[in-house]
C-alpha cells in the first residue's frame, strides 16, 4: 500500500496521511498538488510532502486521495525543504507556510460537479436530506456542490453526497475551475505556403489589385525581418496595424486569402518591453574594487555584507554581479522591502536584463503572480526575479545569487499572520539550499548583519565614496527647545533656518523633503478643562485626528470615530490638538509657501501601487517641489534635485520604547538625509530636536556608523539582547483579562522551570489591548549558541501541557522568533 503525507492549508498538524489510489501511484510525487477530503464538509487542495509505504499508526480510517490536480509538481525539492526549515525555525505549521507561499490562483478552487444515476432505485427508504439532494437534479443535470447546497438549503450536503455515493445514487466528477486566466495576445505570421522568395513573389502577384493589402504585407515583412533569419522576430497584430496604418479589415482580408495567419500567444503582464538592451555601466575604480572584494569574499564565505553609503552605486555593482550569474545559466533573486520597489528600479534593471527580468510584488494582482510562478515552474532558464519577501517561495530551479537590498529594513520581518519569518535570514537559508551566495546591501546595515560581519561569519565590503564624488549632505542639528525658550519658535513647526533653506531651494528650483514619522493631523486630542482623551473602544490607544477625513482614527485596528463637538465628560468645547502628524506639516507648509506644489507620501495617500507611484513620479518629474512624508520617503529613492531635507522632530524616534530604537533612529535619519544632494549637488539636512547633544544625534551628524554600532553592541551585550542572544516571544491574547493574567503566569512559570532566568515576564506590551484582545508577552532570551531545536521541543512540550488545561482554550497563543 502506498501513502502520501500531504500539507493542508490549515494550522493544525504539519501533515496528514492519505492512501494513494492505484491509478495515481505512478504519477504522484512529492510537490504535486492533489484534492483531498478533510473534515466533514470540505475538499482542499493539498501539496504532497512525501510518498511512502509506512502503515499509519493512527487507528482512524485513512482516506484516499481524491484527485491529482497536476502531475507536474507545483513545488520543486528545494522549496519543500525550505518550507520545512521555515516551519521548524519560526515555530509554525507547514500549513501556515503553504498559505503564505502560494498565490490564490494556484490554491485551485475545487468545484465538485455531481450528477445523479438515472436508473437508481433505492432498496430502502432514503432519509429526507438524501431524497432532497436527489430531487434537486432535473434530468441529466450536473450540479456543483455549492449549487446543491444552495438548492437544497442543506449545510452538510457533502456528507449526504458521500452516503449517496456509497448507494450508487450519484456520481461525482471533479471539475476544477482554475483561478488563473492567462493573458493572450494575437500575433501575425506568414502562412507556410508563402515562405521563401518564389512563394512570396506569388503572394505579391495575387495582390496586384489590392494596394492596401500589398502595403500591409510589406509592412509585415519589414517588421518581422522574415527574409533575414538572424533578425527575424514575432509580430503582434497591434504593432502591425500601428506600423502600417491599415485597418483591421485590410489585415483580415490578407488572412482570408491565406497569405498571413493569426495565432494567439500567452504574454507576460510583468515584462517591461525594452527594444534595445544596454550593457551594464562601466564601474568607477572604487566600485571595481568593491566588486572584486565581493568576489574574493564569496570564495570563502556564503554571505557578504556590502556596506556602501547612500548613492555610492551599490545597484550598479549588483547589476554587474547579476549579469555574471545569469551568464552561468543560474537564477538570481533580488529582494527589496515592500515599498522600495518602484518603476525607478524596475526600469533600471529592465534596461539591462530585458525579458529576463520578472517582478513579484504583493501589490500585483494574483494573476500576475501566478504568471511568474508558472514561468518559473515551466522553464529552467536564467532569470532575474525582483521581488518582495514573499518571492522567497517561488519555485526557483537553480539560484546562483540572492541580493537582499536595504537589508536593515524592518519590513523584511513578517508580523502577522504566521509564518512570522525574517526574509533576510530566510533568504540566506534558501541560498544555502541552492548552493548560492547571498549579498546583503545597505548604507546603514542592521546590527545583526554587521555583527556577523565583524565576527567573520559574513564577508564585509565597504564603499565609502558617493558615485561621481558627490559630497555627503551637511547635517545641521537645530535646538528646538532653545528656540522655544527664546520665543523665536512658539507653536511653529519649523525653525527659521529650515524656512530659510526651503525658501532658498524653491528660489533655485530645487526640491525639498520633509520627514515626520507620524501620519494624520494630531496624534492626541485632549480636553482643555478636564483632560479627557479619546480612546479606541477596541484597543488601548488614543486616537489620531485626521483633518482631511475629519475623523478620529485608531492606527491599530483602523476603526474610525466622529470628532465630538464638545468634550463628552464636561461639555467643554475647546479640544486641544497635540502632537504633529504629516497632515499638519502639510497644512503649515502650504500656508507658509502658498505657491509651492506640495505632495504627501504616507500610508493614507499611498494606499495603492498606482497612488504611490504617481506621487514618486510627480516628485521625480518636478511636478511636486516639497514632499512631506513618513519613513516612506527614506526608501532607496534616487531623486536628482533635492537640496534640502528637514527632519521635523527627531525626538519621537529617540524616545521609542524598544531595544532597537536607537539603531532604527540612526538608520532612518541617515537614510532620509541620503535623499539630499545626489548627482552633482551637495545638500543640507536640518535636524530639529530638543536634544542636540544626544550622542546619537551627533553620530548621525558625522555619519559615524561604526561608532553607533559599537555603542549599541555594548548595550546589547550588557542587557542580553540580539545579536548576542536570540529572542523568542510567546504572545498570548484573550478577551478575558483575568484568564489571560492567570494563564500567562502559569505558562511563564512552567517555562522558567526548564529555562530559568532566560524567561522574562509575562509583561504587558506598550499597547495592552488591540482589537478587543488583551495582550501579554513572555520573552525568552536564549544564548545564540544554544541548540534551537531543543528549545523548540521544550516550548512545544510546555504548550502541550498548557493545552490540558481548559482555561487555556480561551487564549490565542503564538510564537515570534527573532521579533523585529
Ligand atoms: P546606491 O544604490 O548605493 O544608493 P545607486 O546605484 O542608486 O546608489 O547610484 C546612485 C546614482 O549614481 C544613480 O543615479 C546611478 O545611476 C549613478 N551611478 C552609480 N554608479 C554608476 C556608474 N558606474 N556609472 C554611471 N552612473 C552610476
Ligand atoms: Zn472635558
Ligand atoms: Zn483600535
Image (cartoon, rainbow, N blue to C red):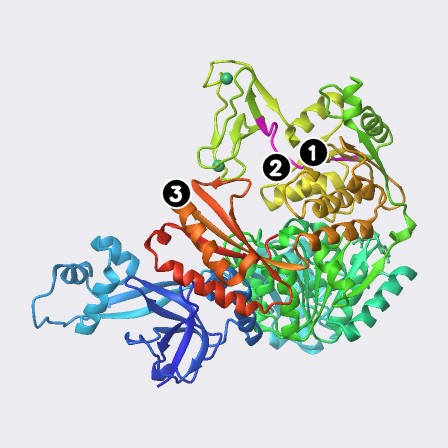
Identified at 28% across, 76% down, the residue is 59
- Residue 523: say if magenta: yes
Report which residue position mark 1 lands on.
Answer: 599
Residue nearest the viewer, comparing 621 with 475:
475
Tell me where residue 201 appears, x and y as whole percent: 69, 73
Residue nearest the viewer, comparing 277 with 170:
170
Residue nearest the viewer, comparing 167 with 799:
799
Q: Which residues are magenta?
A: 512-524
What is the chief secondary structure element of the magenta stretch?
A: loop
Residue mark closest to the camera, 3 vs 2: 3
**Tags 2 and 1 touching, CB below 8 Å:** yes
Separation of residues labelled 3 and 2 (CA atoms): 40 Å
Disc 1 secondary structure class: strand
Tell me where residue 434 appears, x and y as whole percent: 65, 74
Along the horizontal axis of the image, is 349 left or right of 288?
left
Q: Which mark is residue 239?
A: none
Q: Earlier in the sequence, mark 1 or mark 3?
A: 1
Along the horizontal axis of the image, is 358 left or right of 750?
right
- Residue 445: say if magenta: no
Separation of residues labelled 1 and 3 (CA atoms): 48 Å
Picture quadrant of residue 254: bottom right
Q: Earlier in the sequence, mark 3 or mark 2?
A: 2
Tell me where residue 202 appears, x and y as whole percent: 66, 73
Q: Earlier in the sequence, mark 2 or mark 1?
A: 1
Report which residue position mark 2 lands on.
Answer: 605
What is the crowding at mark 2: few (fewer than 14 residues within 10 Å), some, or many (at least 20)? some
Disc 2 secondary structure class: loop
Report which residue position mark 3 lands on.
Answer: 738
Amino acid at each position: 500500500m502506498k501513502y502520501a503525507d500531504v500539507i493542508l492549508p490549515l494550522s493544525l498538524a504539519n501533515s496528514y496521511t492519505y492512501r494513494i489510489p492505484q491509478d495515481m501511484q505512478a504519477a504522484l510525487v512529492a510537490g504535486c498538488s492533489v484534492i483531498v477530503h478533510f473534515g466533514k464538509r470540505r475538499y482542499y487542495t493539498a501539496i504532497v510532502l512525501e510518498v511512502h509505504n509506512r502503515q499509519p499508526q493512527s487507528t482512524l480510517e485513512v482516506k484516499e486521495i481524491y484527485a491529482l490536480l497536476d502531475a507536474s509538481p507545483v513545488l520543486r525539492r528545494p522549496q519543500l525543504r525550505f518550507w520545512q526549515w521555515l516551519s521548524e525555525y519560526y515555530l509554525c505549521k507547514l500549513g501556515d507556510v503553504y498559505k503564505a507561499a502560494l498565490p490564490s490562483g494556484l490554491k485551485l478552487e475545487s468545484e465538485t460537479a455531481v450528477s445523479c444515476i438515472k436508473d437508481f432505485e433505492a432498496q430502502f427508504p432514503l432519509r429526507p436530506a438524501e431524497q432532497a439532494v436527489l430531487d434537486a437534479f432535473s434530468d441529466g443535470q450536473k450540479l456543483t456542490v455549492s449549487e446543491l447546497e444552495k438548492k437544497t438549503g442543506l449545510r452538510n450536503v457533502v456528507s449526504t453526497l458521500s452516503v449517496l455515493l456509497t448507494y450508487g445514487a450519484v456520481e461525482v466528477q471533479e471539475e476544477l475551475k482554475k483561478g488563473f486566466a492567462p493573458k493572450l495576445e494575437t500575433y501575425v505570421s506568414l502562412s507556410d505556403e508563402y515562405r521563401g522568395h518564389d512563394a512570396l513573389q506569388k503572394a505579391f502577384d495575387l495582390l496586384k489589385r489590392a494596394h492596401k493589402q500589398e502595403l500591409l504585407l510589406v509592412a509585415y515583412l519589414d517588421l518581422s525581418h522574415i527574409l533575414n533569419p538572424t533578425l527575424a522576430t514575432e509580430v503582434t497584430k497591434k504593432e502591425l496595424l500601428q506600423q502600417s496604418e491599415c485597418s483591421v479589415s485590410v489585415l483580415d482580408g490578407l488572412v482570408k486569402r491565406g497569405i498571413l495567419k493569426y495565432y494567439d500567444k500567452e504574454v507576460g503582464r510583468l515584462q517591461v518591453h525594452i527594444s534595445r538592451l544596454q550593457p551594464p555601466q562601466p564601474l568607477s575604480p572604487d566600485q571595481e574594487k568593491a566588486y572584486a572584494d565581493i568576489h574574493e569574499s564569496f570564495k570563502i564565505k556564503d554571505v557578504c555584507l556590502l556596506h556602501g553609503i547612500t548613492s555610492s552605486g551599490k545597484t550598479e555593482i549588483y547589476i554587474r554581479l547579476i549579469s555574471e550569474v545569469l551568464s552561468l545559466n543560474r537564477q538570481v533573486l533580488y529582494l527589496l522591502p515592500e515599498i522600495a520597489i518602484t518603476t525607478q528600479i524596475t526600469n533600471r534593471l529592465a534596461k539591462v536584463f530585458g525579458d529576463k527580468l520578472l517582478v513579484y510584488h504583493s501589490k500585483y494582482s494574483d494573476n500576475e503572480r501566478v504568471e511568474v510562478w508558472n514561468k518559473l515552474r515551466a522553464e529552467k532558464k536564467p532569470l532575474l526575479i525582483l521581488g518582495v519577501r514573499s518571492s522567497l517561495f517561488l519555485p526557483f530551479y537553480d539560484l546562483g545569487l540572492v541580493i537582499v537590498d536595504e537589508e536593515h529594513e524592518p519590513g523584511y520581518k513578517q508580523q502577522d499572520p504566521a509564518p512570522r519569518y525574517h526574509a533576510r535570514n530566510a533568504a540566506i537559508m534558501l541560498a544555502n539550499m541552492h548552493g548560492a551566495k547571498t549579498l546583503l546591501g545597505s548604507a546603514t546595515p542592521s546590527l545583526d548583519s554587521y555583527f556577523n560581519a565583524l565576527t567573520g561569519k559574513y564577508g564585509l565590503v565597504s564603499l565609502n565614496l558617493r558615485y561621481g564624488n558627490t559630497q555627503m549632505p551637511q547635517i545641521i542639528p537645530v535646538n528646538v527647545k532653545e528656540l522655544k525658550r527664546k520665543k523665536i519658535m512658539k507653536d511653529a513647526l519649523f525653525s527659521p533656518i529650515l524656512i530659510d533653506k526651503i525658501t532658498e531651494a524653491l528660489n533655485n528650483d530645487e526640491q525639498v523633503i520633509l520627514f515626520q514619522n507620524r501620519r494624520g493631523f494630531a496624534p492626541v486630542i485632549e480636553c482643555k478643562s478636564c483632560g479627557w482623551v479619546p480612546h479606541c473602544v477596541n484597543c488601548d490607544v488614543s486616537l489620531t485626528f485626521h483633518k482631511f477625513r475629519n475623523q478620529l482614527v485608531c492606527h491599530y485596528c483602523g476603526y474610525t470615530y466622529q470628532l465630538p463637538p464638545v468634550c463628552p465628560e464636561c461639555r467643554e468645547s475647546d479640544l486641544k490638538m497635540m502632537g504633529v502628524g504629516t497632515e499638519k506639516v502639510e497644512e503649515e507648509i502650504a500656508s507658509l509657501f502658498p505657491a509651492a506644489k506640495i505632495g504627501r507620501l504616507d500610508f493614507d495617500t499611498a494606499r495603492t501601487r498606482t497612488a504611490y507611484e504617481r506621487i514618486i513620479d510627480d516628485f521625480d518629474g518636478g511636478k511636486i517641489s516639497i514632499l512631506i512624508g513618513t519613513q516612506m520617503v527614506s526608501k532607496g529613492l534616487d531623486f536628482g534635485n533635492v537640496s534640502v531635507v528637514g527632519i521635523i522632530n527627531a525626538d519621537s524616534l529617540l524616545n521609542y520604547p524598544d531595544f532597537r530604537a536607537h539603531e532604527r533612529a540612526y538608520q532612518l535619519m541617515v537614510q532620509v538625509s541620503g535623499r539630499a544632494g545626489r548627482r552633482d549637488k551637495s545638500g543640507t539636512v536640518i535636524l530639529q530636536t530638543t536634544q542636540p547633544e544626544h550622542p546619537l544625534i551627533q553620530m548621525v551628524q558625522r555619519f559615524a556608523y561604526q561608532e553607533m554600532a559599537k555603542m549599541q553592541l555594548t548595550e546589547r551585550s550588557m542587557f542580553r539582547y540580539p545579536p548576542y542572544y536570540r529572542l523568542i516571544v510567546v504572545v498570548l491574547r484573550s478577551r478575558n483579562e483575568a484568564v489571560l493574567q492567570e494563564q500567562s503566569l502559569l505558562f511563564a512559570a512552567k517555562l522558567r522551570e526548564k529555562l530559568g532566568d532566560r524567561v522574562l515576564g509575562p509583561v504587558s506590551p506598550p499597547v495592552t489591548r488591540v482589537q478587543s484582545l488583551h495582550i501579554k508577552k513572555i520573552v525568552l532570551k536564549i544564548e545564540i549558541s544554544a541548540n534551537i531545536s531543543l528549545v523548540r521541543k521544550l516550548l512545544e512540550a510546555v504548550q502541550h501541557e498548557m493545552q490540558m488545561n481548559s482555561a487555556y482554550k480561551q487564549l490565542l497563543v503564538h510564537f515570534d522568533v527573532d521579533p523585529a
